[in-house]
Image (cartoon, rainbow, N blue to C red):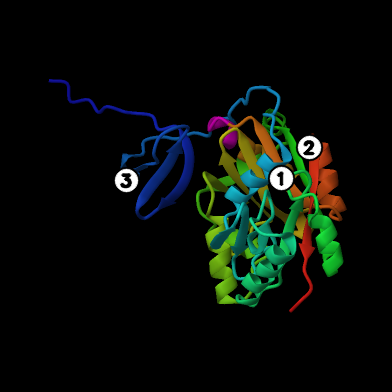
Amino acid sequence: MDDRPVFRDVIGVLTSWDDLGLTVVPRSGDPVSFDEKLLVAGKVVPLFPARRVAPPVATAVELQRIAARGWPAVEQEPLGDWTLRASAGFTRRANSVQALGDPGLPLPRALAAVQDWYRARALPAWVEVCVPGSPEELRAELDRLGAAYSPTLVRTAALATLARIGSGHDRVRLSRTAGPEWMALYRRVTDDPAVEEAARAVLHGGPSVWFATVPGAAGQPPPAIGRCVIDGPWACFGAIEVAPYARRAGLATALMAVLAARAAEEGATGACLQVEAENDGAIALYDGLGFTTSHTYHYARLPQW
């Protein structure tokens, strides 16, 4: 009888290694967990060789809806075709009405309903305006009400371009959750427990979410973090943060390359992201990574009640 042990390979992303054992997320299928005693050997596998294909075609409306699915608000309610969204004030995207299509009411009444809905939650009323996509008369009605505008660029690129650039990929760690180290660098979190709870819910929402971290020195927060949500053929990047002392060292590029390779393993071919129009530093970075502007949308803030 042959009593020799049988060895099997588990190839994928190592997402945890602790007292409970190891968990590896393979290219397809469910995560694989096993006891550390079963580990015989391991090695780092190079990034997935993403295929050089053009990004998928998507309209402005489709990209807005993809972004919304990757950043789902804690509370959502329809207003006709519009979607009211609230998350304790955590980010404008998760606390604005996505005004795509017909609200089912005359615009003055629809915007009054928006103001009432956010007033009930002690939140400012933000309207996400996208042209094409939002009603043609919406901008004029918002102007009449004295709304203040803030433009945001939606940028896209071929995913394979990202997966093949940069260096320092071996420093990047991937996880399905935003742990304490990741959250320590994320600049949008406050000391308000309600906001932090909402932030965690939003950050972990989406079809297939990955968090990237460049670990810091012992006891120190990481110098760089990032997030990516894979939604069919699209990989949506966000929360790309680099500590001031670590900038201009290629860490953001390394983070995005590793996240892009993981997204390519799940079948994505296009990359997209949203960046505030006045964020010149981030725009310059994304220009260098091959991103171009698909469209611009605006957050319009209605006057306070």
Q: Amino acid at mark 2?
A: Phe
Element under disc 2: loop
The percent position of residue 54, horizontal first and vertical second, equals 71, 24
Taking the image as shown, residue 290 lies to the left or right of residue 175, namely right
The percent position of residue 100, horizontal first and vertical second, equals 68, 50
Ranked by sequence position, the earlier of labels 3 and 1 is 3
Other-residue count near label 3 (Cα within 10 Å), few / some / many at <14 / 14–19 / ≥20: few
Residue that carries the numbered disc 1 in the rendered image: 273
Magenta residue span: 262-267
Q: Nearer the viewer, mark 3 or mark 1?
A: 1
Q: Amino acid at mark 1?
A: Leu
Residue at image coords 86%, 66%: 144
**Residue 74 placement: quadrant:** bottom right
User: Residue 172 magenta-drawn?
Assistant: no
Element under disc 1: strand
Ranked by sequence position, the earlier of labels 3 and 2 is 3
Do the numbered discs 2 and 1 sit on residues whose CB atoms are within 8 Å? yes
3D distance between C-alphas at marks 3 and 2: 42 Å
Q: Which mark is residue 291?
A: 2
The percent position of residue 79, horizontal first and vertical second, equals 60, 59
Position of 165 relative to 197 (above/below): above
Residue that carries the numbered disc 3 in the rendered image: 35
Position of 161 relative to 118 (above/below): above
The percent position of residue 96, horizontal first and vertical second, equals 67, 62
3D distance between C-alphas at marks 2 and 1: 9 Å
Ranked by sequence position, the earlier of labels 2 and 1 is 1
